[in-house]
Image: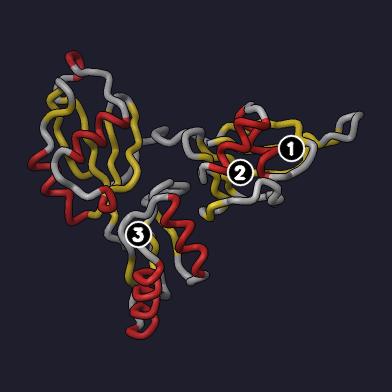
Amino acid sequence: MDSNRFRELYARAYEKNYITHTDFLNLEEQSELVGEHLECTLFGGYENAERVMAFFGEGFDENDTPIGIIRISPSAKKFADALTHRDFLGALMNLGIKRELLGDIVIKDNCGYLFLDRQLAQYICDNLTRIKHTTVKCELCAALPDGAVSDPEESSVFASSQRADVLVCAVYRLSRKQGAELFVQGKVFVNSALCKNPSRLIKEGELVSVRGYGRFRLCSELRKTKKNRAVLGVKIY
């Protein structure tokens, strides 16, 4: 989805006084949207979702969106393959479904919880019957089960500064060269915006996403070491 489409949806929402939305956006699309500085709400069906829809207009209510959840589970757990995110997504793509109509897939107890545009729910329930060698069944559900999304891991890292590259290397234990490559490859995002500047200072509360590694949020400075290095608190997702 490009910038023109974002502006079109934004204008339509405020000219006609109703809420409209995009399809599910990946990190690159979210970054492009953030760069347009259009007032909107990003929501993917649950807190801290990676793939989200952008909602334009006043009065957004997360309980009144087109986002639904389907539980995809093996019909016979005893004989089921160990299913991965790639397996669930591949089976869905084989149905000819556009990726932008699908949100996150959360895995728990060998079941996949798929966030999607609700208009697709019946089609998927009727047609998704097998993943790898495993027969599956699909059903709409109201919410994720308890524990499906783990609480972030609270940790601390030593850092000489709050530069983006310093923090990325510290959190994921990477060399300077490895960290630099991530920025060159466009794999680092801060609050959904692509971060091209490794020296950008990360503020407390900002969310850093690193494609292929995960996400973390900078919390606060915990203390200083004797060598005046900062010990920073982070939450790792």
Indicate which disc residue 63 carries: 3
**Crowdedness of circle 2 by 10 Å Cα count: few (<14), some, many (20+)?**
many
- Residue type, mark 1 in image: Leu
| Identity of the residue drawn at 45% across and 63% down | 33
| Identity of the residue drawn at 39% across and 81% down | 14
- Residue type, mark 2 in image: Arg
Residue lying at the far top in this picture: please name it: 78
Secondary structure under tag 2 reads strand
| Identity of the residue drawn at 46% across and 61% down | 32
Which quadrant of the structure image shows residue 3?
Answer: bottom left
Write down the residue under mark 2: 217
Q: Pointers 1 and 2 in contact (CB under 8 A)?
A: no
Secondary structure under tag 3 reads loop
**Distance of label 3 from label 2 (alpha carbons):** 26 Å
Write down the residue under mark 1: 232
Q: Nearer the viewer, mark 3 or mark 2?
A: 2
- Return the residue nearer the eye: 221 or 61: 221
- Return the residue nearer the eye: 127 or 34: 34
